[in-house]
Image (tube, rainbow, N blue to C red):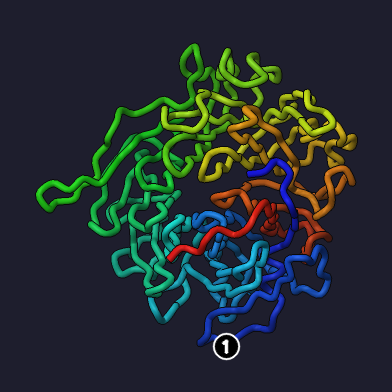
Amino acid sequence: MPSSPVRRTLLSVLALSAVLAPVSLAQRTQQVNGDRKTQIAPTLSKAGGPSDNTTFSQDSRVVRLIAFDSAAGNLVGGDSNSKRDVFVLTRGSRGGDLSGTLVRASVTGRNGAQANGNSSKPSLDGDQKRKPHCVAFQSTATNLDRGDRSSDSDIYLRDLNRKRTTLVSAGHRNATNGVIDGECEFVTYEASGSVFVRDLEGEKTTRIARGKNPDQQTNGKGVAYERGGQIYQQSFQKLFNKGNPTVKRTARELLVSAGSSGRGNGTSADPAADDNGYYVAFESTATNLCKNLCQGISEDENGAVSDVYRRTISSKAPTKDRMQMVSYSWGVSNDFPEGVKVQGNGPSNNPAITGAGENVAFDSEATNLRQSPAIKNIDPNGSVRDIYYWNFPRARKFGNVSRESRPGKALEAGGFFNGASTNPSSSNRANYIAFTSAQSGLSGEANGESIEDVFIRFLGGGPEDTDPE
């Protein structure tokens, strides 16, 4: 990913998704009429409720699908359940184009009856070879599958092609944080203090490890998770034994949150796995993870304040480092090749890693992170939480951080959001970054700061990849 993207455009998905008149109930879709060049669109309708948890299909730069959850009842026709629902946007084919078709995914089979409980935290499939068509999500609904009649949280899978919704977490209570792989073959989730993987084709569920908050690799061969304030990774694979396919652990559990002197001396959380099991990003209050390991910094200068890290966990990774601090910027530009090296002076959290592991988005209250010394007005909104993007091309061997929660203006112009921005996500190749914000009055937002919206920033950076078959 180039360090200076060709084009950056910021659009509000939810404002765009409500622009047209409602369609018929039978159709159950609504056309999204967004213009990717629009920065402020005062004529857009208001989303009637808060939205969050944006995710992208992992089909390289194509990014055919975008999913999020929302309590708004005016995004598609016939939404009258007064519940939080999961929505999927099938977007246009051009880079940065958010026009397309919006559907509600947290519904029953072909008839599309509404869920009678709240649904959230979608996860989309897709990879470089396959078009995405599956979305996993969690829900307290009791009418999405005949196998579930309890109001605790369960994991479901919606096949968008077949228009079929199935229960994934059968036999487990309070299942949450479902993540699907790129082939729509495995879903990992947590329940009762353990991490499970569901083989969708073989219809078998396997306990992988003790832990919570799992994130699965796109290739479906490993999962990262939390346990006891540390981050771990466990590889697994589906093995065929005399016609009896079984998911098995293929290596010993790896402690990810460890530096040169051993495990981190603080609390680590929120793991984010890449495509192939090369890298895991996470947040931590530990102060000993960079010692003699991280590029540019060895001693943690902000103490027990949460920082974001990237750990290399495989010898096959393109970089031969072990640990990097993500919430640390070299501030390099052509005019300032030495840069301004600085660690974030506020807590940084919620990492989202790209498929190749070279880029990480995160949110932070830091006020001193910048991608170039030419930026004098570093953080105009002060300690209001912002979204940052860490770019670590393997050829450069150090990371640069830019602030992305801003209107479509050059960073030097000092554009900023007036509300906190959190919970970022990244497309597989980092050509899109999404986040949730209470920002009001810019980039198509029209429902006020009391309702959080989902925003998408298009970073450009090259032509679209070939569409998967």
On the image, the x and y values in percent for residue 114 come to 47, 74
On the image, the x and y values in percent for residue 62 come to 55, 60
Report the front residue among 195 and 370.
Answer: 370
Q: Quadrant of the N terminus?
A: top right
On the image, the x and y values in percent for residue 468 come to 46, 63
Report the front residue among 299 and 91.
Answer: 91
Report the front residue among 137 and 255.
Answer: 255
The answer to whether residue 138 is seen in the rendering is no
Q: Residues within 10 Å of mark 1 (few under 14, many from 20)?
A: few
- Residue drawn 45% across the image and 62% down it: 135
Question: On the image, which quarter does residue 237 sit in?
Answer: top left
Q: Say which amino acid is labelled 1.
A: Ser
Locate residue 208 relative to residue 427 in the image: left or right: left
Report the front residue among 381 and 457.
Answer: 457
The answer to whether residue 409 is seen in the rendering is yes
On the image, the x and y values in percent for residue 236 come to 30, 40
Question: On the image, which quarter does residue 167 sit in?
Answer: bottom left
- Residue drawn 46% across the image and 55% down it: 128
Locate residue 165 relative to residue 297 in the image: left or right: left
Q: Secondary structure at mark 1?
A: loop
- Residue drawn 73% across the image and 61% down it: 11
- The residue wearing badge 1 is 24
Q: How many numbered marks does the figure carry?
A: 1
Up-down relation of residue 436 to residue 142 (above or below): above
- Residue drawn 66% across the image and 33% down it: 348
View extreme (left): residue = 242
Q: Quadrant of the C terminus?
A: bottom left
Up-down relation of residue 399 to residue 199 (above or below): above
Question: On the image, which quarter does residue 98 sit in?
Answer: bottom right
